[in-house]
Amino acid sequence: MRATNEASVQSTTRAGVVCAMNEASAQSATRVGVVRDIKMFRFETAGESHGECLVATLTGLPSGIPISSAVIDHELWRRQQGYGRGGRMKIETDKASIVSGVRNGCTIGSPIALIIANADWKNWTESLPVEAGDPEKHKPVNRPRPGHADLAGAMKYGLPEARYILERASARETAARVAVGAVARQFLAQFGIQVLSHVIAVGSRRLERPVAWSELVELAGRREVLLGCVDSDVEKEMKEVVDEAYRTGDTVGGIFEVAARGMPPGLGSHITWDSRLDGQLAQAIVSMQAVKGVEVGFAEEGALSFGSKVQDTIHYRKEEQRFYRGNNRAGGLEGGMTNGEEIRVRGFLKPISTLRRPLESVDLTTHEPAKAAYERSDVCVVPAAGVIGEAMVSLVLAKAMLEKFGGDSLPETRRNYDGYCEQVKNL
C-alpha cells in the first residue's frame, strides 16, 4: 500500500513538474509571440477629414533603407490629380513631414511616423475643438447619405448625428495610406519591385483590351493626369461620362487595376487561410473607401470559361534558369503565393456617396423624410483610387517580403533574398 502511495506521489510530482514546465513553455511562447508581434510589419493611420492633421505610423522596416521625402510627396500629389475632383483639392497641397524613424535619409529600424497637415483645419477649429467648445458652432450631419458610413456609424457608436462618423470615414484618410505606401514602395525598389496602376473603366466606358507593362510605365511618366487610362481615345469617352455626371449633379465610379512586377516566386503561403497573399491583397483593396469588389487576374473571365482555357501553362528558360507562364490569367498568384509573374489586381469602385442632387433619407432628429446631406465632394475619383491601390499593394508586398526574408537591416534582408533567389534557380 505504501509503495502504491509513494508511486502515486511521485507520479503526481512528475505531473506537477510537467505542468510547471508546460506553463513555463507557454509563458516563453507568449513572450516570443509578443516579441514577434512587436517586430511585425504593420501600419496605422489616425486623423479626421477636417481635423488638424493626418498621422501615419509604419513599424517593422529594417534599417538602412534610403527614404526620400520627395518620393512621398510625389505620390501625395498623384493622389490629388484626376478629372472630376472636388474643391478640397484646391485647398490642400499635401506634403508629409517625417517625424521619426528616418535619419540622414535612411530608416533606422524604429517606427516611422508621418504627419500630413490639413490646410482646411483653419475653417473648422471652432466646429471641431478638442476641448469642450461652443455647441452653437458645431456642424451636425442630421441627414445621413445613402451609401455612406453615416447612419450605420451613428447607430454603432451611439451618436445623435453623423458628423464624427463622416470625419473618420472620409476618403481623406487615404492620404495617410499613400504616404506610408510610398515608404513601402521605396523598400520594394531595393529589390527591383515596381508597382503601377491604370484605369480600366469609368462608368459604362471601358478599355476592352489587355494593357502591357510598358504602357503603364509610359502612363506613370505623364505630367498631366486626366483619368489614368493608357488609351487616349477611350479616356476621352471616360471624360464624357464624368461631364454628364457634373451636369446632372451625380457621381460616377469605375474600375482600376494595380500591377506589380519583380516579385520572387513564393511570397505568401498555401498552408493557412490568412497567409494566402491573394486574400491579403483582396482585403487591402476592399478596405479602401467606396471599393466594393476585387478581381485577381482574370477571375470573372475564368469563371465563365473551361479549365483548358484558363490555366497558365508552365515553361522553362534554360539561359535564365527560371520558370515562366505562357499567360498570366492568374494575375501572378497561384495557391495564395506569387509565381514570379506580374501581379494584377483590380478594384471596383462605386460612385461617391455625396451627391449634389441628394437622394432620399431621414432626418435623425425628427425621423421625418428628408434629402441627404451634401458637403463639398468629388464627382469621380477612379484615378486617385488607383494611386491608393498602389500604396495598399506596396504595403502588402513589403509585409510579405519581410515575412519571407526577415532581417533587421537592409544588408541582412538582401543576403536572405539573394540566397533564396539562388535556391530557386537551382530547382
Image (cartoon, rainbow, N blue to C red):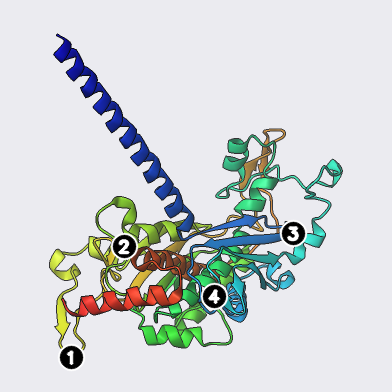
Residue 38 picture location, percent across and down: 48, 54
Select label 4 or label 2 by which is in front. Answer: 2
The residue at 29%/30% (across/down) is 17
Select label 4 or label 3 by which is in front. Answer: 3
Image disc number at residue 268: 2
Residue wearing tag 1:
319
Select label 3 or label 2 by which is in front. Answer: 2
Amino acid type, residue under disc 2 in the picture: Gly
Tell which circle, 3 or 2, labels the residue nearer the N-terminal end.
3
Residue wearing tag 3:
52
CA gap between label 1 and label 3 equals 57 Å
From the viewer's perspective, is 281 left or right of 310?
right
Residue wearing tag 4:
240
The residue at 64%/45% (across/down) is 144
CA gap between label 4 and label 3 equals 36 Å
Answer whether residue 425 is visible to the viewer in this image: yes
